[in-house]
Image (cartoon, rainbow, N blue to C red):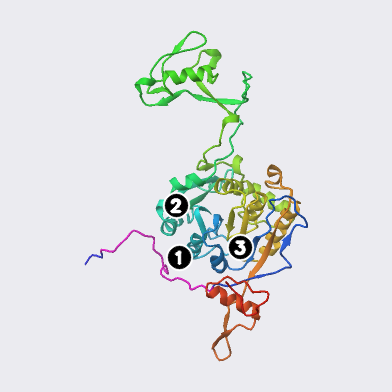
């Protein structure tokens, strides 16, 4: 008998196994929390959060307070390449990797704000499987784009075909038509603009005054300053009706190249540009390369071996400038060397970063302290005119509330002090921990 409930989906061993997660509390470690000694500006942000611990448990710990609040998530998970990365177990069995990603993406999706977005950096090893997985978690209709990042410019001669790019999958909590209203345009480029005719409106470049197709009212002859005439190119029509063209001409917006003999072009002034729609191809000269990012890390930590795949600050800047505004909340649950937090801080976004290993203290804390102090000269510091300021809290995940005693019974962990126990119970019951300063038995609301 045919199963009529069949559906198209990605399957793997253990897909139906879902972990039961305990919502842990966060314990601040004042030794590593850090704040500027004084305000640098009125827009300084001090309530950023750096968490050391397993990112799945950390995300569960954040869920109660931050559900629906994160405007942009950027993650750069282990690629499952089989290489022995110094800082991550990147050799996970394929099904295990898919389960690892699915479990985290499900919680991340709940943290995303309305019209929020998630940007996932991946390579060809798992990228196609991840795309199908994300379709299941976020909905295929909420897929925004596949961004291609040119991560290297040097040629890889050892490979059959050298890999020079990573993929960044972009999803939202809404369809592209809705997210388009929320996303920002890129700053307009003026690298090809000039002002050869000293137009008082400033530098400009030009585009052909023609459009694809045939429209009868846009088929006419145009006379050039030299006395010649032009008809639309074959298979095209002029870019507007003749009356509109006359308005452009009277306003000094028409340019005839080749000394006044060429086909008309329309001047586009830099001063009038609102911005550029982001494209799906991000070139190295626009957003940097892996080599650039390694130099940024080495400048911060001389003599240390950098991560194998750090991301340049310019790449993260591009993402955050498209997806967020000042004051928005950014999350990276695979923080690595701290690039996302550093860039978000310089761009005056609020941020949460999660890192499992000791690099949370050896790299992330030290790097962001320099950002707060204004002593990090690299990356986007110069272009953003960053002078320091703000701060962050450093927290660890509390141990499990319950443990086995010597008779194998579940008991409250001995590590829990009374105030920790009160906070943990509040979290488990769905309350926010807020101890009353006067009434000792009131701990939540």
Q: For residue 174, which numbered disc appears in the image?
A: 2
Principal secondary structure, stretch drawn in magenta: loop
Helix, strand or loop at label 2? It is: loop
Which quadrant is the C terminus positioned in? bottom right
Helix, strand or loop at label 3? It is: strand
Q: Residues within 10 Å of mark 1 (few under 14, many from 20)?
A: some
What is the spatial separation of the Cα atoms under label 1 and label 2, in whole angstroms? 28 Å
Q: Is residue 260 toward the left or the right of residue 214 in the image?
A: right
Mark earlier in primary sequence (2, 3): 2
Picture coordinates of residue 222 (x, y %)?
Answer: 44, 14
Mark earlier in primary sequence (1, 3): 1
Residue 196 among those drawn in magenta: no
What is the spatial separation of the Cα atoms under label 1 and label 3, in whole angstroms? 24 Å
- Mark 3 — residue? 354
Which quadrant is the N terminus positioned in? bottom left
Helix, strand or loop at label 1? It is: helix
Mark earlier in primary sequence (1, 2): 1
Picture coordinates of residue 326 (x, y %)?
Answer: 62, 49
Q: Residue reaching furthest front?
A: 438
Q: Residues within 10 Å of mark 2 (few under 14, many from 20)?
A: many
- Mark 1 — residue? 95
**Residue lying at 48% horizontally and 73% vertically, measured from the top left:** 20
Contact between marks 1 and 2 (CB within 8 A): the answer is: no
Q: Nearer the viewer, residue 269 or 234?
A: 269
Q: Residue reaching furthest left?
A: 1
Quadrant for residue 27, please give it.
bottom right
Quadrant for residue 395, please give it.
bottom right
Span of residues in magenta: 4-22
Picture coordinates of residue 229 (x, y %)?
Answer: 45, 11
């Amino acid at each position: 008998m045919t199963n009529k409930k069949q559906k198209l989906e990605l399957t793997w061993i253990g897909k139906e196994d879902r972990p039961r997660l305990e919502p842990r509390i966060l314990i601040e470690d004042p030794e590593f929390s850090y704040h500027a000694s004084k305000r640098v500006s009125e827009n300084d942000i001090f309530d950023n959060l750096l968490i050391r611990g397993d990112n799945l448990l950390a995300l569960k710990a954040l869920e109660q307070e931050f559900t629906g609040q994160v405007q942009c998530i950027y993650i750069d998970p282990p690629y499952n390449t089989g290489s022995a990365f110094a800082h991550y177990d990147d050799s996970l069995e394929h099904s295990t990797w898919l389960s690892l990603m699915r479990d985290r993406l499900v919680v991340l999706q709940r943290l995303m704000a309305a019209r929020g977005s998630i940007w996932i950096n991946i390579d060809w090893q798992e990228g196609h499987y991840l795309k199908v997985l994300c379709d299941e978690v976020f909905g295929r209709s909420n897929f925004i784009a596949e961004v291609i990042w040119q991560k290297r410019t040097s040629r890889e001669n050892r490979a059959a075909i050298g890999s020079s790019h990573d993929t960044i999958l972009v999803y939202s909590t809404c369809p592209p038509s809705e997210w388009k209203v929320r996303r920002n345009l890129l700053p307009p480029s003026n690298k090809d603009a000039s002002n050869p005719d000293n137009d008082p409106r400033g530098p400009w470049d030009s585009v052909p005054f023609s459009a694809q197709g045939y429209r009868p009212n846009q088929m006419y002859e145009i006379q050039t300053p030299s006395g010649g005439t032009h008809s639309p190119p074959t298979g095209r029509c002029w870019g507007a009706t003749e009356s509109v063209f006359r308005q452009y001409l009277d306003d000094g917006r028409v340019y005839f190249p080749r000394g006044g003999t060429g086909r008309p072009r329309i001047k586009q002034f830099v001063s009038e540009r609102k911005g550029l729609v982001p494209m799906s191809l991000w070139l190295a000269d626009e957003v940097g390369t892996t080599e650039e990012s390694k130099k940024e890390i080495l400048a911060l930590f001389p003599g240390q071996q950098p991560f194998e795949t750090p991301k340049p600050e310019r790449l993260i800047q591009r993402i955050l400038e498209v997806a967020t505004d000042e004051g928005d909340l950014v999350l990276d649950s695979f923080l690595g060397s701290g690039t996302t937090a550093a860039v978000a801080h310089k761009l005056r976004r609020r941020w949460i970063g999660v890192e499992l290993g000791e690099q949370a203290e050896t790299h992330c804390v030290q790097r962001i302290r320099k950002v707060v102090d204004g002593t990090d000269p690299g990356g986007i510091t110069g272009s953003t005119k960053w002078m320091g300021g703000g701060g962050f809290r450093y927290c660890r995940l509390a141990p499990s509330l319950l443990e086995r005693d010597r008779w194998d019974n579940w008991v409250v962990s001995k590590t829990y002090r009374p105030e920790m126990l009160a906070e943990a119970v509040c979290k488990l019951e769905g309350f926010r921990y807020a101890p009353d300063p006067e009434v000792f038995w009131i701990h939540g609301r």
